[in-house]
Image (spheres, grey):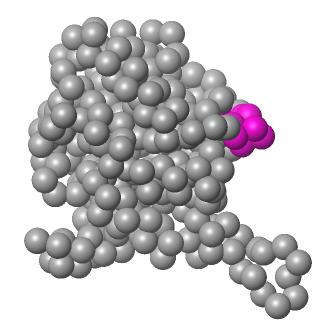
Amino acid sequence: MLMNPFWQTSRFQIDLAKPQVMGIVNATPDSFSDGGAYFSSLSTSSVLAHCEQLLKAGADILDIGGESTRPGAVALPLDEELARVLPVVRHAVQLGVPISVDTYKPEVMQAVLDLGADIVNDIWALRKPGAVQVVAGHPQCGVCLMHMHREPLTMQTAPMAGDVVQQVRDFLQLAAQGLQGLGVDRSRIVLDVGVGFGKTVAQNLSLLQCQPELLSLGYPLLAGWSRKSSLAMLCADEGDSAEVPTPLPMSERMVPSIAAALLAVERGARVVRVHDVRETVQALKVWTAASF
């Protein structure tokens, strides 16, 4: 089945002929990747400034999230997520690029879509009660459906077992087909295998190796490898005196993150969700020049 050449969202048809760089905007004080460097409980001005910095660095899409979904994370109350996210979205929709919101709560989805957000990026793939109705009831917002084993609080305590590629493929296929059954056009749907969400290092690599099998579903893929712990383990320091290899600290994960993003694009992913926007954009320019 042929993949759509664009991603239909609320205000934009995103051209997928060019790999799209989605810049991560964490409006949360407990993000796994930046520890809340851009968030203040008193003001969102630093988050808004970060949005603009990512656009100057070359981001095509901004992905705003108010709740950490790192392994072991506890769910955030609705009111607090709304307080973190809505001021940022209200500003970001004026920046002239597609705005995605990383949330699984239907109330947040509805609120940000009412403000003009373009994409719902849901780690639960619209499985929370009411979420699918919000997206299906919107005229044309984009949606990213992600695979997650268990939930953030417990997902890494007992990772998946069995054929991870087939399980992820089947889950995403059913989620996308169910949404289409409610009248959502397939051009609005992008899929995400959920790197690190209840999966081992080997399983994450298997999903990268087998991307063509996942692409056979006919939907564009979003790849989210940026700064993930699997990369930290793969590049762990195996110093002479170390009995147990030391995973790369967060500050040293940019290079493996870019390598993973390039591999994902080379194997067919059309959107990469990243923290290091400028460096990823530069790497993709080299890849594009050498590929076409």
Left or right of 243: which side holds 82? left
Q: Is residue 161 above or below residue 134?
A: below
* Image quadrant containing the C terminus: bottom left
Start-end of magenta stretch: 151-159
Q: Quadrant of residue 94?
A: top left
* Image quadrant containing the N terminus: top left
Q: Is residue 105 magenta?
A: no
Foreground of the two, 214 or 134: 214
Q: Is residue 170 visible?
A: yes
Q: Residue at x 36, y 44 (%)?
A: 213
Q: Is residue 153 magenta?
A: yes
Q: Is residue 140 above or below residue 41?
A: above
Left or right of 114: which side holds 290? left
Q: Is residue 101 visible?
A: no
Foreground of the two, 184 or 176: 176
Q: Position of residue 204 (x, y in %)?
A: 55, 52
- The dominant secondary structure in magenta is loop
Q: Residue at x 36, y 41 (%)?
A: 214
Q: Is residue 202 above or below residue 86?
A: below
Q: Position of residue 127 (x, y in %)?
A: 50, 18
Q: Position of residue 275 (x, y in %)?
A: 44, 61
Q: Quadrant of residue 91?
A: top left
Foreground of the two, 239 or 162: 162
Q: Position of residue 221 (x, y in %)?
A: 32, 44
